[in-house]
Image: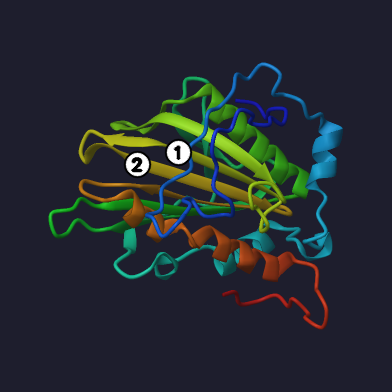
Amino acid sequence: MTYARALRISGVVAACGGLLLGCTGGGGAASPPTASVASRSGNATASADSQAAASATSETDPAREPKTAAQARALIERVISGPELFGTGVARATPYESDPGQWAVLGDDCLWRLEPLPGDTLATLTRHFEVPAAGGKGSVRLSATVTVHRTALDASWEQARMLEEDLDCTEQTQRPGERLTGLQSLSFARGEGGNTSGDDLLLETGQCVSDTRGGPYPYWWQQAVLGSVVAGTSVCGGRGRSEQELNSLVAEVLPRMLLRIQQEIGRPTGSESGANGGGS
């Protein structure tokens, strides 16, 4: 699929605030947000000019954003999640890291394929994790991805493309024998739906089904843009795993990665220097 015009989701029935996948109310259990995605008709309302305006942010400093592939790879290593960010019991999966020279592209046939990085992308990396099967419960699959684009506008276009693809493909094939079904998506600009950490936040919910692991199990994915950097996390449940259990694994991972990104490319505030280097 080519890069799409920016789309805005309408017809949201219910959405949870903030960058958490689930919402908690009245001491109840967390559950993923639900949404009713309206028809694509009339959704393509943003032009390239408005998209460029939306990509400007007072939260990041373009001078601090990576300019070369080497700088982008170094930033990714500093901000991407390791298993410890998901919590205890989470281990590296095999394979652990993606090929840094490729990224996943969803085709018109709703099949994910690996392709060389496009010219507007400096670097990307996906790490795969799992919670092993134990105590009569099945394994859980997790992922974290960070992509660095040449400009904030390029990153915004990636987000817009992903949103259109989600609308086009409510069922997707990740790889032979593994599918996503019943997908619904919604997005929040900064200041909408409690989104205070990213320039734009995209949430997707559905089910994951595997010829070997069974299913369907709950599937959640979230991706946020901050300046020229795009970060995302996903979780695919397993036999006997509750939604609350899955939510507890991923709820804080993306906000923590965004905090690290902010520390890398954010504008200094007050007496803080926002120096490059370590993150939370």
Left or right, 15 with reference to 87: right
- Tell me if I can see residue 120 in this picture: no
Question: At x 73% / y 60%, what residue is drawn?
Answer: 66
Question: Which residue in the structure is indicated by mark 1?
Answer: 205
State how far apart marks 2 and 1 are (Cα).
8 Å
Task: Where is residue 112? Give x, y as percent.
Answer: 45, 32
Marks 2/1 in contact by CB < 8 Å: the verdict is: yes
Residue 160 against residue 236 in the figure, above or below? above
Task: Where is residue 94? Give x, y as percent.
Answer: 31, 55
Outermost residue, left direction?
136
Which quadrant holds residue 260? bottom right
Amino acid type for the residue under numbered disc 2: Pro
The C terminus - image quarter: bottom right
Left or right, 142 with reference to 48: left
Q: Which mark is residue 242?
A: none
Question: At x 39% / y 55%, what residue is drawn?
Answer: 28
Task: Where is residue 39? Give x, y as percent.
Answer: 60, 19
Question: At x 70% / y 75%, what residue is drawn?
Answer: 276
Q: Which secondary structure lies at badge 2?
A: strand
Sequence-wise, the earlier of marks 2 and 1 is 1
Residue 196 against residue 212 in the figure, above or below? below
Question: At x 76% / y 58%, what residue is drawn?
Answer: 67
Task: Where is residue 210? Give x, y as percent.
Answer: 26, 36
Amino acid type for the residue under numbered disc 1: Thr
Q: Which secondary structure lies at badge 1?
A: strand
Left or right, 272 with reference to 142: right
Viewer-closest of 1 and 182: 182
Q: Which mark is residue 218?
A: 2
Which quadrant holds residue 90? bottom left
Badge 1, how many Cα within 10 Å: few under 14, some, many 20+?
many
